[in-house]
Image (spheres, helix red, strand yellow):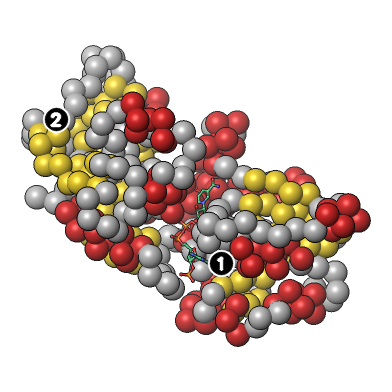
């Protein structure tokens, strides 16, 4: 569907560039550059005028310098623009481009060009066209978290028998991704035990369909609670995004043959796991990375995702929308506990 937000195209644009690795909420790590050139599309490329882009934990890891592959890119290229995803409108085409002007798209961005800028130039085949019934702010967070949730649950279904034991456990359950996991698990009749840090969002998670919510600060030995809930069996799988003590306790909650699937590292600390559990309980330990999983999927995985939005299984929430020039405030808000949704940058500030 064409969008009227097509013209005019300026010569210069505003973008957020990485100056050096460091804490994103500190002055001088990033800079707002207001005179970056707007690229010109050639061949099958299109120019996308970006509308919204979220702040993801992986963006924070990139800026700090922890994300694999990025250090190399930054060393080679001054003015690296972070931002994993976002949505925009096609406003110019190369001679051979097939995506029409005005089409709303989610560009699949590589390591050279992130989403925290007003214009990006990408190959047409690297664009996912956004259906009319998905709004701009949802489209801006269409892929990274929702596809990861789909992938995580597919991995669980592939590696453990959820008919035998329908219970799974997730840490960081109040995250945007954790909330979607609750919703998709409920949609598939999989029962969830959800571990959160504090009780403020407990009722919201229950309303989303969480079967059990455990609050870490209220229940220091919550692994025992998990065994009570599962009648002594433990859970079939753990979806783990924290590490540290929380991840270690989650590992202890697995049934024999259970799956420990790590996909995040919010605490930055490792977990403890015992060799005897690995040997005698035959635990499967695995990591999940969307960048590795997604390219191996059939094209209909994105269409299936749109259906989950249409059925309102996925309804990503927004905490705050801020213009790019309030980036320091955005990074400070990103670090606050008990957020109820994503922080988005609004990229057309003027
Ligand atoms: N592997 C992949 O391919 C992949 C893809 C997408 C996302 N992810 C990962 O998925 C996770 C969630 O992403 P998101 O975008 O949904 O995040 P988000 O909305 O920004 O939420 C972050 C969550 O992390 C929790 N948290 C932060 N520090 C913590 C700590 N020290 N101990 C316990 N909990 C802590 C927060 O808890 P409170 O609610 O208590 O504040 C919050 O719920 C991230 O780790 C991200 O890197 C991985």
Confirm if mark 1 falls within 8 A of ligand 1. yes
Q: Quadrant of residue 18?
A: top left
Classify mark 2: residues with Cα within 10 Å, few (<14), some (14-19) or many (20+): few
Q: Is residue 47 among the parts visible in the rendering?
A: yes
Nearer-the-camera pick, 12 or 7: 12
Residue 255 lies, in percent from the top left, at 83, 62
Q: Secondary structure at mark 2?
A: strand
Q: Which residue is mark 1?
A: 173
Q: Quadrant of residue 129?
A: top left
Vertical relation: 340 (above or below) 79: below
Classify mark 1: residues with Cα within 10 Å, few (<14), some (14-19) or many (20+): many
Q: Quadrant of residue 99?
A: top left
In the image, which disc is placed on residue 87?
none
The answer to whether the residue labelled 1 contacts the one labelled 2, judged by CB atoms less than 8 Å apart, is no
Residue at the far bottom: name it: 218
Confirm if mark 2 falls within 8 A of ligand 1. no
In the image, which disc is placed on residue 37?
2
- The residues tagged by marks 1 and 2 sit, at their Cα atoms, a distance apart of 41 Å
């Amino acid at each position: 569907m064409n969008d009227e937000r097509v013209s005019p195209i300026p010569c210069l644009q505003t973008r957020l560039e990485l100056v050096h690795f460091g804490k994103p909420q500190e002055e001088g790590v990033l800079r707002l550059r207001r005179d970056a050139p707007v690229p010109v599309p050639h061949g099958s490329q299109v120019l996308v005028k970006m509308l919204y882009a979220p702040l993801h934990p992986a963006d924070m890891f990139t800026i700090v310098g922890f994300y694999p592959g990025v250090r190399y890119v930054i060393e080679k290229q001054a003015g690296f623009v972070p931002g994993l995803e976002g949505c925009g409108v096609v406003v110019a085409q190369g001679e051979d481009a097939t995506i029409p002007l005005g089409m709303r798209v989610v560009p699949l961005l590589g390591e050279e060009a992130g989403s925290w800028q007003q214009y990006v130039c990408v190959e047409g085949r690297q664009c996912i066209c956004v259906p009319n019934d998905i709004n701009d702010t949802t489209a801006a967070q269409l892929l990274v978290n929702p596809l990861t949730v789909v992938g995580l649950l597919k991995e669980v279904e592939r590696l453990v028998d959820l008919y035998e034991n329908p219970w799974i456990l997730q840490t960081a359950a109040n995250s945007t991704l954790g909330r979607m996991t609750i919703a998709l698990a409920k949609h598939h009749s999989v029962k969830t035990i959800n571990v959160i840090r504090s009780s403020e969002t407990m009722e919201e998670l229950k309303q989303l369909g969480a079967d059990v919510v455990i609050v870490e600060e209220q229940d220091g030995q919550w692994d025992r609670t998990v065994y009570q809930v599962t009648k002594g069996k433990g859970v079939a799988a753990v979806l783990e995004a924290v590490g540290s003590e929380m991840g270690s306790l989650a590992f202890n909650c697995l049934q024999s043959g259970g799956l420990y699937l790590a996909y995040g590292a919010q605490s930055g600390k490792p977990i403890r796991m015992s060799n005897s559990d690995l040997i005698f309980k035959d635990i499967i330990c695995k990591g999940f990375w969307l960048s590795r999983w997604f390219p191996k999927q059939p094209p209909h995985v994105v269409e299936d995702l749109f259906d989950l939005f249409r059925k309102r299984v996925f309804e990503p929430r927004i905490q705050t929308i801020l213009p790019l020039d309030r980036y320091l405030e955005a990074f400070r808000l990103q670090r606050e506990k008990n957020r109820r949704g994503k922080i988005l940058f609004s990229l057309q500030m003027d």
